[in-house]
Amino acid sequence: MLKAALLFVFAALFLSPLPPPVAGTVFDDRNANGVRDPGEPGLAGVVVSNQVEVVRTGADGGFELPSVGTGVIFVSVPEGRRVVGRFWRATDGGPPVFALAPLAAPAEFAFIHASDTHLNEQSLPRTRRLKALVDSLKPAFLIITGDLIRDALRVPEAASRPQFELAAREFEAIGVPVWTVPGNHDLFGIERHLSLVPLTHPLYGRGMYRHYLGPDYYSFNYGGVHFVGVNSVDHEDLWYWGHVDSLQLAWLKRDIATLPPGTPVVTFNHIPFATTAIDLDGYTDDPPAPTLIRVRGTTKFRHMVNNTDTILAALKPARLELALGGHTHRRESIAYPADGRLIRFHQASAVIAGAEIAGVPTQSGVTVYRVRGGRVDDGTFVPLP
């Protein structure tokens, strides 16, 4: 009887149909209307990913991914193109089709790095000020490195959804492309003793961010630079910490492998790869965010990425031009001489408000970077009154 039952289990495992691959198309949206009209061909060689596998489109613009991956598929917008509509699709929404319109390659451009909007109805005026500043400066695009909403960590679904819906609307209203990554406050429900969200909730952890804002790590190209959004917020049971997990690291290596050697790269993420904030703020055991955390028996820093060395190794075939972060609510610039060049780690101040250093408040603001020939300058801080 036992033998028969085991045979049934093994047969079920090996004979069950595998999930089908995901097939889609990337096309040349020559009139930028988001619809594939007659005479608009597919685009060959465009990188598409499900956050696990990385593939290129064929001669007809078609692609096939072997699985749904994390449930989100994105196009890594290539040089000389802009996306019409969203750059990502959920895998449960039918065959993904991406429209890319022509875009003149700029010899020089500027982008804005902002962080920590902590958006809800009460803080909305701060994000509206950010929008006004962007409208005035007219950068090529805006990067926001996490803590986009006030808090999803410790609250139930009914409190988290309106914040994400507000963020999606407000970012859509900004007049330039907005590229975001999640922060610790954008992880849904993980402090379960407070949120009362079960582990089995379909949007638990990263799920709600992906539902409203798309992939939590991805890449795009602009002006001769490869930009990589990284999710540097991992979580262990109830608590977040600075770490890039193995699935994302494997994806990062595949993404970088699509580039010519030495391509300039800018990374952007929430918890910094390197920061002096831990020294400036001092050690604390106090909740809600003590300095250290125990992860599977090992003590780790919470507020700095613990495997930065592994990330830098994954990026080595390219040329890391600049690593952008947030989380600390203060403008910070660090440079390390290495391999005959400087490796730079910059953090943005917070949109919501600056942090305090030794009781002295720092100023809210953003950083404007200018790029020419694949070289990114050190940025100019612009206060956000």
Image (spheres, rainbow, N blue to C red):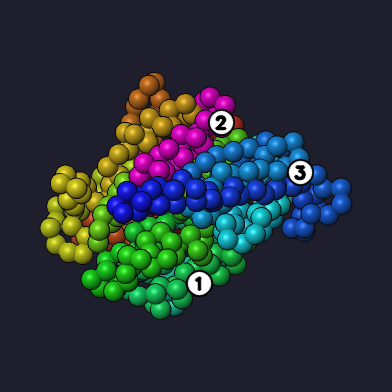
Span colored in magenta = 244-270
- Amino acid on which the number 2 mark rests in the picture: Leu
Circle 2 Cα neighbour tier, 10 Å, few/some/many (<14 / 14–19 / ≥20): some
Residue drawn at the location 76% of the way across and 43% of the way down = 42
Front: mark 3 or 2:
3
For label 2, the residue is: 259
- Name the outermost residue toward the front: 1
Residue drawn at the location 72% of the way across and 42% of the way down = 61
- Amino acid on which the number 3 mark rests in the picture: Gly
Residue 165 circle label: 1
Secondary structure category for the residue under label 2: loop
Residue 273 circle label: none
- In the picture, which quadrant includes the C terminus? bottom left
Left or right: residue 285 versus residue 109 is left
Residue drawn at the location 80% of the way across and 44% of the way down = 41
Q: Is residue 77 visible?
A: no
Residue 42 circle label: 3
Secondary structure category for the residue under label 3: loop
Q: Is 259 included in the stretch rendered in magenta?
A: yes
Q: Is 167 included in the stretch rendered in magenta?
A: no
Marks 1 and 2 sit apart, C-alpha to C-alpha, by 35 Å
